[in-house]
Image (spheres, rainbow, N blue to C red):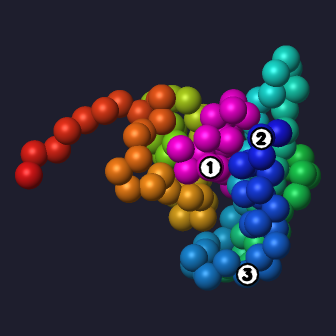
Amino acid sequence: MGAATKDFFEQLSSHEHEPLLETTTGTIRLDLAKSGNRKERWLVSIDKGDVDVSHRSSAADCTIRAPEALFDRIASGEENAFAAALRGEVIIEGDSKLLVRLQRLLPSPPRGAPRGSGNASRKTKR
């Protein structure tokens, strides 16, 4: 498991209550594909901001499947989870609103930083 992924889940599990999720209730299972045929599995249970993180393998309201290396870039702020899902690099099953809620907790890329390799460059007119 990448350092950013491990740090993200450790930090999330250290917060018993997350104010950004006070209107959220549901479970998110992340299946992160490792080399070979192995998976790293995380289950995030949210109950009106109360958060529990584990490695349980159970049914969830939202299942997110991604390569481990990609999620490590998401957890470090180099990639955006929802943008990766729109590109088809992350597979979402179930309630996709929960990915949007989880995105609130993930770091954002620094302003002006180059985008990750999976992001297309675009110019905006002002």
SS under mark 3: loop
Distance Cα–Cα, label 3 vs label 1: 22 Å
Magenta range is: 59-78
Relative to 39, 83 lies left or right: left
Task: Tell me the amino acid under the disc marked 2.
Answer: Gly
Relative to 7, 120 lies left or right: left
Q: Are marks 2 and 3 in contact (CB under 8 Å)?
A: no
Dividing the image into 4 quarters, which one contains the N terminus?
A: top right
One can see residue 83 in this view: yes
**Residue 20 to residue 123: above or below:** below
Of 117 and 52, nearer the camera is 117
SS under mark 2: loop
**Residue bearing the label numbered 1:** 76
**Residue bearing the label numbered 2:** 2
Residue at point 68%, 41% (across, down): 72
SS under mark 1: helix
Please rate how many residues cluster around mark 3, counting C-alpha atoms within 10 Å: few if below 14, some from 14 to 19, many from 20: some
Q: Are marks 1 and 2 in contact (CB under 8 Å)?
A: yes
Going from the N terminus, do you reach mark 1 or mark 2 first?
2
